[in-house]
Amino acid sequence: MKSNYHFKFEGLQVYQKAMDFGEIINTLVMKFPNHELYALSSQFRRAADSIALNISEGYPGSDAQFIKHINYSIYSCNECVSCSTKAKRRNYISQKEDEENRMYLSELTKMLSSLRKKIQERNH
């Protein structure tokens, strides 16, 4: 059910995609071993969630503030790449799952970079 209250950042495609990615990772880490619960599982979930959280946190601020948070989102994408690689190397996820994560993260990073560039261009 949709809310009667809408925030502007929720209309951003990159925000929607980042929200979806967070849910994908949340489901994916459920199959990690229990000893990873407070380690890689937690780190991966937090990094994945951080992508959307930083978009929403930076949105209402100044352009400089928003760009800073877009950069944080990109950093979180990069962290997710490392988490996915670790998960693959530990045989928690398949090569295919790692590749899907990388595809998603590549797309998110490109979208974030494009948004950052658009904001920078309107200030010049």
Image (tube, grey):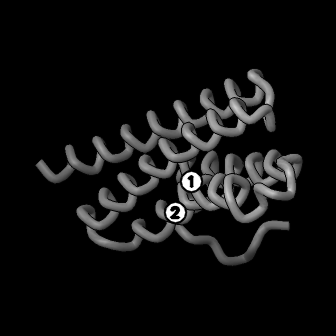
Residue 104, above or below 71: above
Image coords of residue 7 (percent x, y): 56, 71
Residue 124, above or below 11: above
Q: Quadrant of residue 95?
A: top right
Q: Foreground residue, 88 or 14?
A: 88
Disc 2 is placed on an element classified as: helix
Q: Choose mark 1 or mark 2, whichever is in front.
A: 1
- The residue drawn where x is 66% and y is 77% is 5
- The residue drawn where x is 66% and y is 34% is 101
Q: Specify few, some or many for label 1: CA neighbours under 10 Å numbering under 14, 14-19, or 20 or more.
A: many
* Residue picked out by circle 1: 15
Quadrant, the N terminus: bottom right
Q: Foreground residue, 1 or 62?
A: 62
* Residue picked out by circle 2: 9
Disc 1 is placed on an element classified as: helix
Whether tag 1 and tag 2 are in contact, CB under 8 A, the answer is: yes
Kindly tell me whether residue 56 is visible in this rendering.
yes
Task: Report the side of 118 relative to 98 (left or right).
Answer: left
Task: Report the side of 35 relative to 38 (left or right).
Answer: right
Image coords of residue 4 (percent x, y): 73, 76
- The residue drawn where x is 79% and y is 32% is 91
Q: CA distance from mark 1 to mark 2?
A: 7 Å
Image coords of residue 80 (percent x, y): 57, 44
- The residue drawn where x is 54% and y is 32% is 107
Q: As shown in the figure, which amino acid type bears the numbered disc 2?
A: Phe
Q: As shown in the figure, which amino acid type bears the numbered disc 1?
A: Tyr
Upstream in the sequence, badge 1 or badge 2?
2
